[in-house]
Structures are given as structure tokens and as C-alpha cells.
Amino acid sequence: MAKKKVKKVKVTLRRSVICSLPKQRKTVKALGLRKIGSSVIIEANESMMGMVNVISHLVSVEEVK
């Protein structure tokens, strides 16, 4: 049985979370982002992409090969 190749994306925090909603702040923290400019590489599954969608105005997303 062959393994499926899992897509990964790099999420970078671009804007401050100071004026954002508490739910959005918790989402940023749950993804592992701390300071502006910090990045994490995550698997692109439905739950993670849903989290990224909630904070899409604060982050930039790019596909990792």
C-alpha cells in the first residue's frame, strides 16, 4: 500500500494580533505563531486550513514542496 503524499504549507504571521478577536488570538497561538514574522510549516488538512481561514487577514500562506 502506497502512502499518500501530504501537502504542507508555510504560514507566516504578518500582522499584529492586538486588535483582533480573542478567538483569532487563540487560533494564532494554537498554530504556534508568536511574533510578527514567525513561521510554521503545517499539514494542509481540513482542520488546519480552517484555522488558517479564520486568521487569513493576519497571515500569509505559501505551499512547501
Image (cartoon, helix red, strand yellow):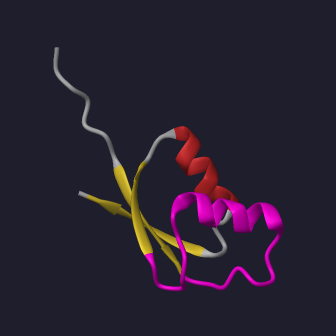
Residue at screen point 66% across, 73% down:
57
Which sits in the foreground, 7 or 41?
41
Residue 63's x, y, as percent?
A: 35, 60
Instruction: Tell me if 46 is positioned left or right of 53 in this view.
Output: left
Residue at screen point 29% across, 60% down:
64
Quadrant where the image shows the C terminus: bottom left
Q: Which residues are magenta?
A: 14-38
Quadrant where the image shows the N terminus: top left
Instruction: Tell me if 4 is positioned left or right of 9 in this view.
Output: left
Asked if the stretch drawn in magenta spans residue 29, the answer is yes
Magenta segment, prevailing SS (helix, strand or loop)? loop
Residue 50's x, y, as percent?
A: 62, 48
Q: Does residue 23 sit above or below 19 in this rendering? A: above
* Residue occupying the far left of the picture: 2
Residue at screen point 66% across, 65% down:
55
- Residue 38, by quadrant, is bottom left
Residue 23's x, y, as percent?
A: 78, 60
- Residue 6, by quadrant, is top left
Asked if the stretch drawn in magenta spans residue 65, the answer is no
Residue at screen point 70% across, 79% down:
17
Count all numbered tags in the image, as a single digit. Answer: 0
Q: Does residue 36 sit above or below 58 in this rendering? A: below
* Residue occupying the far top of the picture: 1
Which sits in the foreground, 52 or 28?
28
Which sits in the foreground, 35 or 41?
35
Residue 31's x, y, as percent?
A: 54, 59
